Amino acid sequence: MATEKDVETVVVGSYVEMETEGKPKGIKSRLSKFLWHGGSAYDAWFSCASNQVAQVLLTLPYSFSQLGMFSGILFQVFYSLLGSWTAYLISTLYVEYRTRKEREKVDFRNHVIQWFEVLDGLLGKHWRNVGLAFNCTFLLFGSVIQLIACASNIYYINDNLDKRTWTYIFGACCATTVFIPSFHNYRIWSFLGLLMTTYTAWYLTVASLLHGQVEGVEHSGPTKVVLYFTGATNILYTFGGHAVTVEIMHAMWKPQKFKAIYSLATLYVLTLTLPSAAAVYWAFGDLLLNHSNAFSLLPRSPFRDTAVILMLVHQFITFGFACTPLYFVWEKAIGMHECKSLCKRAAARLPVVIPIWFLAIIFPFFGPINSTVGSLLVSFTVYIIPALAHIFTYKSAAARENALEQPPKWVGRWVGTYTINVFVVVWVLVVGFGFGGWASMVNFINQIDTFGLFTKCYQCQVPVSVPPQPLNGTAPSPLHHPNVHH
């Protein structure tokens, strides 16, 4: 069949130059590859799994308190399936685009393909512009969220500095990601990042079970429609980490192997997110409504401090994952993308970090900002646009017949694929963007009204000595946050 020949062309011909580049020859090269230069299916799996679950691991118990246990578990499974499906669509469109271009003798040796270029090549400049706007804005705020999470976490180890000051410090640290050339070079970081989130997830699970339920614990969620849809959109955000799918695929020596990788990564992520979120919610219940970071409720111990430090390092890695595509876009805009000098490219990338730093200081609302980004940006970037792009790319009978890859039989071929795509678009548009956008914006505005912009220390405890208590007064509980409400 012609389709099988086309696929064989991709496997054998199109990617052979990248595969050859990935084979080291000397001892130094082998060490470099082991630590620095990855492009295998295993590297892609580590990148997907490590990138998908980062600081959001700490906010999922907060979402469970808004949704209730049953809805929390249901939405995690449901959005993981939706995320895996749209990641499959993105990978299919990438291979289609790249194969067409390589048949035209286009050389991608010094060029990283990005999602907006796939849309441009398959559907035209209007699709490119929409995809570029949503993707860049989402990745910008994704980077902002990592900075906010760094400040929020380190505060539970060292509260001598307020969270805003910690944001300044970690902003400078995260700026060093400008020296990481591409996703090829995240091999050791992706591996370590996944170990870090695995430790943290199981620490949350075991520590919560050992701690037991707090006295008088209540599990009243869901209680309000606003909180319900806010929690749901945070989970939508959790499984919307495939905004960097194209860049990860391009870093592979054999990108056609990517199709199953994202689903396997998502399956592993569920083994981390479900037990940890359920255990913390079981132990602390409605207290989580005022504690968006799960670390804040667990007693300090060497194990908790270790988890905090590991998450800080992981957030540095995830910042790089979110920011690297932005670096590529900026390099292309100023004509530096194919520059061979790493130092020149690093210097050119620095202006990208400045607005991220600034936005993290303006909106330090760890937790609520996840839901807002999820509903307004993730819903379009990684769910609606890929589904619509797949529909319009293969809308004609000729396009479907000549498609490089036919849809799998188990989904019903083209009819089943179109049905699923339409369902994804309608569901995410109505529930994710519509109800979720409304709920998350109401909650986000409430945070601004309560704490204000540029707040120095979001959800920090007010010292007991200010104002002075009467001699017979009772000090507030360590878990009490008098100025926090949602």
Image (cartoon, helix red, strand yellow):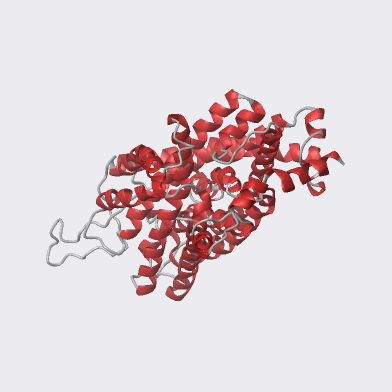
Q: Is residue 419 left or right of residue 475?
A: right
Which of the pair 249/435 is nearer the observer?
A: 249
- Looking at the image, the residue that sits furthest to the bottom is 210
Can you give x and y, in whole percent of width and height, for residue 411 in the image? 78, 46
Q: Is residue 295 left or right of residue 385?
A: left
Can you give x and y, in whole percent of width and height, for residue 163 in the image? 28, 52
Which of the pair 143/415 is nearer the observer?
A: 143
Can you give x and y, in whole percent of width and height, for residue 392 in the image? 70, 29
Quadrant holding the N terminus: top right
Residue pictured at 62% horizontal, 55% vertical = 77
Whether residue 403 can be seen here: yes
- The quadrant in which residue 307 appears is bottom left
- Is 323 rendered above or below residue 283? above
Which of the pair 252/294 is nearer the observer?
A: 252
Q: How many marks?
A: 0
- Looking at the image, the residue that sits furthest to the front is 26
Can you give x and y, in whole percent of width and height, for residue 447 in the image? 35, 43
- Is 348 rendered above or below residue 291? above
Residue pictured at 58% horizontal, 33% vertical = 117
Residue pictured at 41% horizontal, 61% vertical = 311
Whether residue 287 can be seen here: no
